[in-house]
Image (cartoon, grey):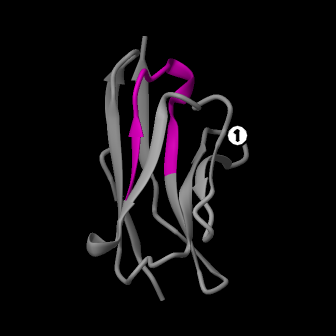
Amino acid sequence: QVQLVESGGGLVQAGGSLRLSCAASRSIGLNAMGWYRQTLGKQRELVALRTRFGIINYDDSVKGRFTISRDNAKNTMYLQMNSLKVEDTAVYYCYLNRDGVEYWGQGTQVTVSS
């Protein structure tokens, strides 16, 4: 079992920045990890995903603005979000696929005001 705990969400004005963190209770190693987001009434959607082979995919809507990274020594992954837009408002979830088992964080709210 792996517990994922997100932090760093909050309220920010459009054009601002936030950095989300996701701390894992066990080593994240070289497993696939990433970030998803969900708004009310919509399905959870991919924001950024780093595969176990190191390939990073971003949703087109965040390319050039968001950056996913990881610190294996701290068992933590990050999502740096710059130039935030109102439409980025959502609950953000971190995701880990460890040895074929999927884990999700509890979610952190990001609200971007105009």
Q: Locate residue 110: give its quadrant.
A: top left
In-image side of 32 versus 19 (left or right): right
Q: Locate residue 102: give its quadrant.
A: bottom right
Give the quadrant of the C terminus.
Answer: top left
Residue type marked 1: Gly
> Circle 1 sits on which residue?
41
User: Looking at the image, can residue 110 be seen?
Assistant: yes
Q: Is residue 84 above or below residue 90?
A: above
- Relative to the observer, which residue lies in front, 14 or 111? 14
Q: Locate residue 71: give its quadrant.
A: bottom left
Question: What residue span does the magenta drawing correspond to?
Answer: 77-92
Residue density around tag 1, few if under 14, some if 14–19, many if 20 or more, within 10 Å:
few
Residue at point 53%, 37% (across, down)? 90
User: Looking at the image, can residue 9 be seen?
Assistant: no
- Relative to the observer, which residue lies in front, 37 or 74? 74
Q: Secondary structure at mark 1?
A: loop
Q: Where residue 86 sits: x, y (%)?
A: 50, 19
Query: Does 90 appear in magenta?
Result: yes
